[in-house]
Amino acid sequence: MATQPTNPKSVYDFVVKDAKGNDVDLAAYNGKVLLIVNVASKCGMTNSNYTELNQLYEKYKDKGLEILAFPCNQFGEEETGTNDQITEFVCTRFKSEFPIFDKIEVNGENAAPLYKFLKTGKWGIIGDDIQWNFAKFLVDKNGQAVDRYYPTTSPLSLERDLKKLLGI
Ligand SMILES: *[C@@H]1O[C@H](CO)[C@@H](O)[C@H](O)[C@H]1NC(C)=O
């Protein structure tokens, strides 16, 4: 288990695990604009959030955007029963271009330290807890979470805010 910062100042202070269990130092993303998303670990892949995230990534990765996706299954399975096989099928065929990390928890005592940090912003009516899959955080080029959006906010509707942070 990677050691975690006691008094983190930015997301660059965190080390997370990739899908293979290797440490990834988020300092590697210094200077990038980050879109951090919790995704359904089993297969939210049929969800159009994925399509739109890929579209954003395609469009802005060369301009300094990175999307970091963290699977989390604290929000139940979006597809159950007989849909499972279909979902699985769609899932294995789906390819995301952006990194998908190791599964984490985003709420409660065992929440990943990164998520504890992201949630400490002044999020007003959004509240502290992550509501569902596909909550979205925009992190500026200094590693600060500056915007947070509900799961229901479509990735493409963040484009304006994203461009502002990218300075384009
Ligand atoms: C993204 O996912 C959330 C949670 O499942 C859903 O409420 C929302 O409608 C999705 N948005 C899009 C654009 O698919």
Image: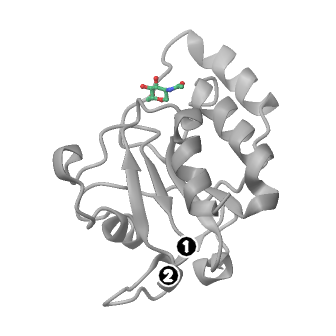
Labels 2 and 1: the sequence-earlier one? 2
* 43 with respect to 117 (left or right): right
Look at the image and tell me in which quarter the C terminus lies: bottom right
- Mark seen at residue 1: 2
Q: Is residue 43 visible?
A: no
Whether residue 130 is visible here, answered yes or no, is: yes
Q: Which residue is mark 1?
A: 16
Q: Which percent across, then down, holds residue 45?
A: 63, 30
Q: Nearer the viewer, residue 167 or 11?
A: 167
Amino acid bearing label 1: Val
Mark 2 Cα shell of 10 Å, populated few (<14), some (14-19), many (≥20): few
Establish if 53 lies above or below 127: above
How far apart in space, not on screen, are marks 2 and 1 (Cα)?
A: 9 Å
**Three-letter amino acid code of the residue under disc 2:** Met
Image point (36%, 65%), residue name: 118
Q: Residue at x 58, y 12 (%)?
A: 83
